[in-house]
Image (cartoon, rainbow, N blue to C red):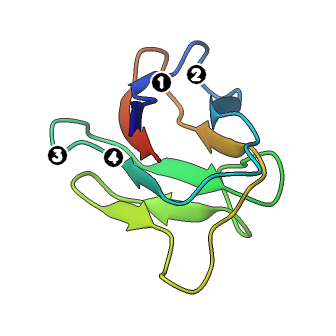
Amino acid sequence: GTNRSGTIATGGTAQNAAAALATRKYIYVENPITEVERLWLDYTGTAVADSPSIPLEPGQWWANPPHFVPTGAISVIAATTGHKFIAKEA
């Protein structure tokens, strides 16, 4: 797998945690328990801090279900610059 973990470069601005990858078999994104705010993710477009993006509270994670692997870019957003996220891809 590939480590795609990082930090939010500019608070309130979406960024890609992982680029589109047609051969992706697995993607995992976690909002570390050490963070104090939500991390939002989207695999169908640019993440926003609201629906339809997926909210992750500190300590929560999202991984693709066995029957579906998104191959588009994985976008994340959080309010604060430097907000950490964990992302793993295979």
Task: Report which residue position mark 4 lands on.
Answer: 31
SS label for mark 2: loop
Q: Amino acid at mark 4?
A: Asn
The dot on residue 30 is: none
Instruction: Tell me which numbered mark, 2 or 3, is placed earlier along the sequence.
Output: 2
User: Which residue position is annotated with label 3?
Assistant: 33
Marks 1 and 2: CB-CB under 8 Å?
yes
Instruction: Find the residue positioned furthest to the front.
Output: 23
Residue 64 drawn at (x, y percent): 51, 70
Residue behind mark 1: 80
Give the Cα separation between the discs numbered 2 and 4. Answer: 15 Å
Q: Are marks 4 and 1 in contact (CB under 8 Å)?
A: no
In the rendered image of this protein, does residue 47 appear above or below residue 86? below
Question: Nearer the viewer's eye, disc 4 or disc 1?
Answer: 4
Q: Is residue 17 left or right of residue 42?
A: left
- CA distance for labels 1 and 2: 4 Å
Q: Which residue is mark 2?
A: 11
Between circles 2 and 4, the one closer to the viewer is 4
